[in-house]
Amino acid sequence: MLGQVLREEREAAGLTQEAVARRIPVNRSLVSRWESGETAIGPEMLKRLAEIIGSERLYREAALAVSSVFVSPALDGAVDLHRANVLAVWREEMQEALEIINEVERAITRAPEGVTEQDRQRIREAVHQVIDLEAACEHLVAALARTYALDLVGLYKEHHDKLRARGYTRTRRQADQAEVA
């Protein structure tokens, strides 16, 4: 699957295997083997390929290949990905998430040992709904970036920088230094 996505996204970007291979740099035959699924693509190379090709779909598939969870797969089935439709789905998912979170808010604010099994089941349903919302958010961001030629990678890098500037996250170096201390 990943190799097929790589090929499709490379072609959609108007790049040849040779052009991608030169930018990495690797042999063109290796790009061909990645696309055919004959050779696995390592995590660092996946990141580099996604940067070169600039594809949200390839980033998403790369994240799935590396973690297998915590990211929604690219929607490529019977789904209308026009920005207006994606916005409508986002709005619906947002409303559903707000409704169920409001329903379980009292249980969420209680200590875990004070939550009934019924509460726990409703909290689980709420988490599922928030995951649906998260996927809708990811696809709305991608649709808007694609439609308006926004640099999605740049936007996420700016977001990460903002989180670090606010002290919400640390750089890998800071985290490593904290572990040593």
Image (cartoon, rainbow, N blue to C red):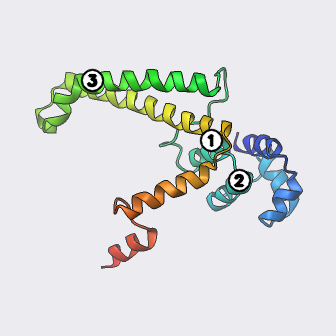
Q: Which element is circle 2 on? A: loop
Q: Which element is circle 1 on? A: helix
Q: Badge 3 is on which residue?
A: 122
Q: Position of residue 8 (x, y in %)?
A: 78, 40
The quadrant in which the C terminus is found is bottom left
Q: CA distance from mark 1 to mark 3?
A: 35 Å
Residue that extends furthest to the bottom in the rendered view of this protein:
181
Q: Position of residue 153 (x, y in %)?
A: 60, 52
7 or 97, which is in the foreground? 97
At horizontal 34% and vertical 78% (from top left) the residue drawn is 180
User: Is 5 on the left or on the right of 72, as rendered?
Assistant: right
Image height of 102 relative to 157, above or below:
above
Q: Is residue 121 visible?
A: no
The quadrant in which the N terminus is found is top right
At horizontal 64% and vertical 50% (from top left) the residue drawn is 151
Foreground label between 2 and 3: 3
Image height of 77 relative to 137, above or below:
above
Q: CA distance from mark 2 to mark 3?
A: 41 Å
Name the kind of residue labelled 3 in the image: Arg
Q: Badge 2 is on which residue?
A: 40
At horizontal 84% and vertical 51% (from top left) the residue drawn is 32
157 or 124, which is in the foreground? 157
At horizontal 41% and vertical 26% (from top left) the residue drawn is 94
Name the kind of residue labelled 2 in the image: Ala
Label disc, if present, on residue 56 of the rendered structure: none
Image height of 60 relative to 94, above or below:
below
Q: Position of residue 11 (x, y in %)?
A: 83, 43
Mark 1 vs 3, N-terminal side: 3
Q: Which element is circle 3 on? A: helix
44 or 148, which is in the foreground? 148
Q: Badge 1 is on which residue?
A: 145
